Image (cartoon, grey):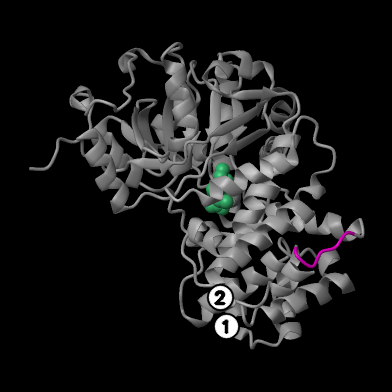
Amino acid sequence: MSPPRLTEASLHSARSGTILPTYDRSATRFGIVHIGPGAFHRAHQAFYADTLLHSDKRWAISALSLKSTGLRDSLAPQQGLYTLIELGAAPRARAIGAIRELLVGSTDADAAFARLSGRDTRLVTLTVTEKGYCLDPRNELDLANADIAHDLKNPPSSTGQGPRSTIGWIVEGLKRRRAAGLPPFAVVSCDNLADNGAVLKRALVAFARQSDADLAHYIENEVVCPRTMVDSITPATDDDLRERSRKITGLDDAWPIQREPFTQWVVEDLPVMRDADWVSVGVTLAKDVSVYDRAKLRILNGSHSTLAYLGSLRGHESVADAMRDEQLAQFVELLMTEDLGPSLGASPGLDVQHYISAVLARFRNPGIRHLLSQIAWDGSKKLPVRITATLTEALRAGRPIHRLVMPIAAWMRFVVRQAKANVAIVDPDAKRLTDIGNACTGDARADVARFAVCESVLPPELFADEKFRRELETAYGRLATPHSAITPELSS
Ligand code: CS2
């Protein structure tokens, strides 16, 4: 007999050991609208909100998916409840009750705007990934992006429909609040972008400026976008996890989530974040988030992407598998200690060597099967943040770049391999990358030149640099045989 479905009614029959929300969910208020309630949000921010709700009922989440209906269809029958499995030595289950409403922008536009304009709504938070910000290679709003262009041309007031872009939703929400005489919500990016708060704010202002200079001015002056750093390794859900969750809790959950035990959320210490005692639930409020986000994006995410492309080329499937490849693990450690770590400059309060060791230990966690293919997604948006910035600085400062070019060369080889094998490339620039990959012949000089049009990864100033091109071509050439490509680095 299959176990009962996780719902409010069955919750208390969960097996002992399962941590349950003990607050009255029906008494909570919607203080947060979250856009993009994917696995990371449910494993990370919703967990913090769930903890906070035990002492402060103002922070329930209304989860807004822009297009996909999958989450609503899975969690609505569970009243938004789901299981979070922490992958420690002994996996632990916790039912999260923070998400109390699931909306889909394309079908529930009125309800979503009502929530955005709600008196209780204090924060709009986002996990929409790098591509969700619709930025150009200079990190400014890309007015030519199809969703942005659509939303500028078709304002919701004239169509009665929801916008397509996250930026469009937020600007319209702010506009309606202002018209209703309500104070603005703060907008909190929880994505892996450098200086995510400032980048987001510039994009909101740029969007508003296209139609309403006054609104742009208002956003510029009144809307707060704190800078954040978010961290917790969250492998995608698979059938194994569904089975595991069922065994631990004794309940059937359509969409459980898993993550490592480690989790960190650092938010810029602004008055809006003092509205609630976020610190009591483990959030760090910091005057300067840059020390945290630079270290995390460069050391953790930079090495993750390196492992994703080099590891895939060397035939590995997961991060832990790749870390068992001694040469590869040694290369990544060298990259961290010799290149990524030193690129941080003065980092008050951060012990870089200790941070590197902790990240390496997390990558080695055998209890987590984090697929390299998942990390390899969206390389054209991730590499600029994770590697290109460090590389550009190293080149300018006259520091070595021969290791730093390796993840970029490996990404190119990965793109070529996927294209030639007719395997779909998951990337907002997939069409162009597939064409480039198919055109490549293996000649390093010509192939590298073909990738120059990917200006976010290879900015023209960088590509024009002789030394950079030479090093990149050498790395790409060596990766014709991925198993010997990094050997010279290890012996030098
Ligand atoms: C990963 C991140 O998928 C990826 O690109 O590098 O999601 C990483 O697991 C998280 O940022 C860890 O906090």
Residue nearer the viewer, 156 or 366: 366
Number of numbered discs on residues? 2
Q: Where is residue 272 in the image (x, y as percent from the top left)?
A: 63, 18
Quarter that holds the N terminus = top left
Q: Is the magenta stretch mostly helix, strand or loop?
A: loop
Question: Is residue 376 in the magenta section?
Answer: no
Residue nearer the viewer, 346 or 102: 346
Disc 2 residue crowd, few under 14, some 14–19, many 20+, Cα 10 Å: many
Q: What stretch is highlighted in magenta?
A: 399-403
Disc 1 residue crowd, few under 14, some 14–19, many 20+, Cα 10 Å: some
Which residue is labeled 2 in the image?
434
On screen, 277 above or below 211? above
Instruction: Decide if residue 206 is in sight here.
Output: no
- Dot 2: what SS? helix
Residue occupying image coordinates x 43% and y 53%:
369
Whether tag 2 and tag 1 are in contact, CB under 8 A, the answer is: yes
In the picture as drawn, the residue positioned furthest to the left comes out as 1
Estimate the spatial distance between the alpha carbons at disc 2 and disc 1, rounded to whole Å. 6 Å
Which residue is labeled 1 in the image?
438
Which kind of residue does numbered mark 1 sit on? Asn
Instruction: Decide if residue 281 is in sight here.
Output: yes
On screen, 31 above or below 477? above
Q: Is residue 442 left or right of residue 155?
A: right
Q: Position of residue 106 (x, y in %)?
A: 40, 44
Q: Where is residue 193 in the image (x, y as percent from the top left)?
A: 66, 45
Quarter that holds the C terminus = bottom right
> Which image quadrant is residue 257 in?
top left
Which kind of residue does numbered mark 2 sit on? Thr
